[in-house]
Image: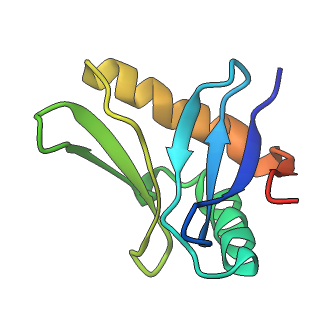
Amino acid sequence: MAGTFEIKKAKDGEFYFHLKAGNGQIILASEMYVGKSSAENGIESVRKNAPIDAHYERKEAKNGQPMFNLKAANHQVIGTSETYTTTTARDAGIESVKANAPDAPIHDLTV
């Protein structure tokens, strides 16, 4: 089963998206956007940048667990991962984003 993007609306009216793997797990989460079109543009940026390994910032969260950010060409963060228990698991998460993002359909859950 392929991955999907889900656009959602927060209680404060802002929009965000998740990239979910085929198993339903969230593998990338966006920032909050004022408008839905901005969230859609964020998805297009993820699709464009996901295949480029150099756009992944591999780091540790404040609790010391491995995680990553996906950055656009202008170095702005366009998606953030969950935290992982090992760097191997984090790297598998990156590979999952690379595999799923370019062709993942968008499910708009705001309508």
Q: What residue is at 73 percent from the left and 74 percent from the top?
A: 36
Location of residue 38 with respect to 97 vertically, above or below: below
Which quarter of the figure is the N terminus placed in?
top right
Horizontal and vertical percent for residue 32?
Answer: 51, 68
Q: Nearer the viewer, residue 101 or 31?
A: 31
Location of residue 72 with respect to 89 vertically, above or below: below
Q: Dividing the picture into quarters, in which one does residue 7 lie?
A: bottom right
Q: Nearer the viewer, residue 109 or 95?
A: 109
Q: Is residue 52 left or right of residue 68?
A: right
Horizontal and vertical percent for residue 86?
Answer: 26, 19
Horizontal and vertical percent for residue 17?
Answer: 64, 55
Horizontal and vertical percent for residue 68?
Answer: 35, 45
Q: Dividing the picture into quarters, in which one does residue 3 lie?
A: top right
Q: Nearer the viewer, residue 83 or 109?
A: 109
Location of residue 40 with respect to 4 vertically, above or below: below
Which quarter of the figure is the C terminus placed in?
bottom right
Q: What residue is at 57 percent from the left and 75 percent from the top?
A: 33
Q: What residue is at 48 percent from the left and 37 percent from the top?
A: 94
Q: Nearer the viewer, residue 95 or 26?
A: 26
Location of residue 82 with respect to 59 vertically, above or below: above
- In the rendered image, the residue lying farthest to the front is 11
Q: Is residue 70 left or right of residue 20?
A: left
Colour mapping used in the image: rainbow
Q: Is residue 110 left or right of residue 29?
A: right
Q: Is residue 92 left or right of residue 24?
A: left
Q: What residue is at 64 percent from the left and 69 percent from the top?
A: 42
Q: How many marks?
A: 0
